[in-house]
Amino acid sequence: MRNFFNNGRRPSIFEIATAYENGNEGDKKPRTKVVVNTNRLWYGDDSTVSAFIATAYDEQGNRVDAMNGYFLEPATDYMKANKEGSDRAIMSGTYDVITQKEMKKRISEKTKQREENIVLRYDWYIDNVPGRSGIAIHSGKNGKNTTGCFIPGSSFEPNKQNNDFIINDNNKKDELFHFFQTYGTNGIKINVGPDVSNLIE
């Protein structure tokens, strides 16, 4: 595979990312970051649905790429959002999205456990959530599949059996994780909205 950096022109972000993924060691992966903005719009008895857009930026702050979809979370109760085991959506705010490996490292630093002894189920986690732990992004179908985590999907529909929602994945989780892997080299943030801090005592 040729080296784009040595042919007299500036490579595009797509060319660099593609070359890196295909194993061209002569190319460097671009230092891009991802910002995920979510907005909770639909509330059910056992779940909450938000629309999201994930945007990748280069080091100069230029938009490189973007994708969108939906997240399904548990039911929303902001009085219980910061309580461990509450089975409610987390508090709105800005958080880090990190890999399982990085989560193990952070847990190890806090608890002094050896990383190899820490067992985690999922590939991507949302960290530094007040009062909560183990908040991940993973697959699922409805509110019974999450106790605080985010389930991505391409669409959603009302559950005819109750006042609730069903989310349809259609490979949205894989698309989102590939987006993280491709563009999250300089960090990933998620802004969970809407901001309700003025409503909470």
Image (cartoon, rainbow, N blue to C red):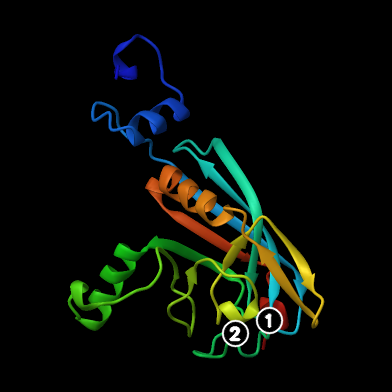
Please state the horizontal and vertical placement of residue 199, each as a whole percent of the image. Answer: 72, 82
Q: Which residue is depicted at the point 39% across and 47% down?
A: 186
Q: Which residue is depicted at the point 43% across and 41% down?
A: 32
Q: Which residue is depicted at the point 46% across and 55% down?
A: 188
Q: Name the residue under label 2.
A: 81
What's the amino acid at mark 2? Ala
Q: Quadrant location of the N terminus?
A: top left
What is the quadrant of residue 201 in the picture? Answer: bottom right
Question: Mark 2 or mark 1, which has the lower sequence index?
Answer: 1
Mark 2 residue crowding within 10 angstroms, few (<14) / some (14–19) / many (20+): many
Residue closest to the eye, 79 or 174: 174
Say whether residue 15 is left or right of residue 42: left
Please state the horizontal and vertical placement of residue 143, each as a whole percent of the image. Answer: 64, 78
User: Can residue 90 be seen here?
Assistant: no
Mark 1 residue crowding within 10 angstroms, few (<14) / some (14–19) / many (20+): many
Please state the horizontal and vertical placement of residue 75, each as a whole percent of the image. Answer: 68, 82
Residue closest to the eye, 117 or 144: 144
Q: Which residue is depicted at the point 58% across and 87% down?
A: 87
Q: Name the residue under label 1.
A: 76
Residue closest to the eye, 59 or 96: 96
Residue closest to the eye, 29 or 191: 29
What's the amino acid at mark 1? Thr
Say whether residue 160 is left or right of residue 148: right
Label 2 SS = loop
What is the quadrant of residue 46 in the picture? Answer: bottom right
What is the quadrant of residue 27 in the picture? Answer: top left
Q: Do the residues labelled 2 and 1 touch (CB within 8 Å)?
A: yes
